[in-house]
Amino acid sequence: MKIKSILAFALAAMIMAACGKTEKSSDEQTQTAAKETNEALKVVLTGYFEVKDALVNDDAAKAKTAATALAASTGNYANTLNEYILAIGETDDIEAQREAFEALSISVYDLAKEGGAGLTVYKQYCPMAFDDKGAFWLSSEKQVLNPYFGASMLRCGSVQETIN
């Protein structure tokens, strides 16, 4: 009878240990998925900032190139972002690029608000963009450099929000 009790106890201990490992494994899987999501969002934000910087510099060719590179790296965010990214990458018309960039900014803002990229992002706003309709963009820097006007009104705008 003693041996049966010891075997039952050992079996119970093994089951409990296995269950503990399953929970840890699940936690590890969650952490790994979160890290992958953080890295993917960081890649998207970095590519977005490259498009923004090209528009700040009134460089339609560079915006096109940066958008094409961004489209190739959107991964899980492709459905959300690629329509706007491709619109930037398919034209040399900087005004059309800026209009698509406004829509892209709205989508990227939503992703940035979800957080997890490990970057500080500044939501900046220009009230004069698009015939005084106003528009915002995201920046990795607090200093305002306006992608909707470029050199003609480089400093037009203000920081509306800081996202961590």
Image (tube, grey):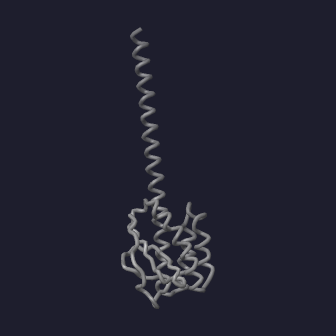
- Coordinates of residue 92 in the picture (x, y in percent): 60, 85
Quadrant assignment for the N terminus: top left
Position of residue 83 in the picture relative to residue 59 (left or right):
right
79 up-or-down from 101: above or below: above
Query: In the displayed image of the protein, which residue is found farthest to the bottom?
Result: 152
Give x and y (percent) for residue 8: 44, 18
Out of 130 and 9, give the one closest to the viewer. Answer: 130
Q: Residue at x 49, y 62 (%)?
A: 40
Q: How many marks?
A: 0
* Residue depicted at 56% across the width and 60% down the height: 76
Would residue 122 appear left or right of 40 to someone viewing this image? left
Note whether residue 48 is visible.
yes
Q: 108 and 73: which one is in front?
A: 108
The residue drawn where x is 43% and y is 59% is: 116
Q: Quadrant of residue 125?
A: bottom left
Depth order, front residue of 31/115: 115
* Residue 160, x across and y down, in percent: 40, 72
Which quarter of the picture shows residue 13? top left
Residue occupying image coordinates x 39% and y 62%: 118
Placement of the C terminus among the 4 image quadrants: bottom left
Residue 54 visible in the displayed image: no
- Farthest residue, direction left: 142
Q: Is residue 121 above or below residue 147?
A: above
Q: Farthest residue to the top: give it.
A: 1
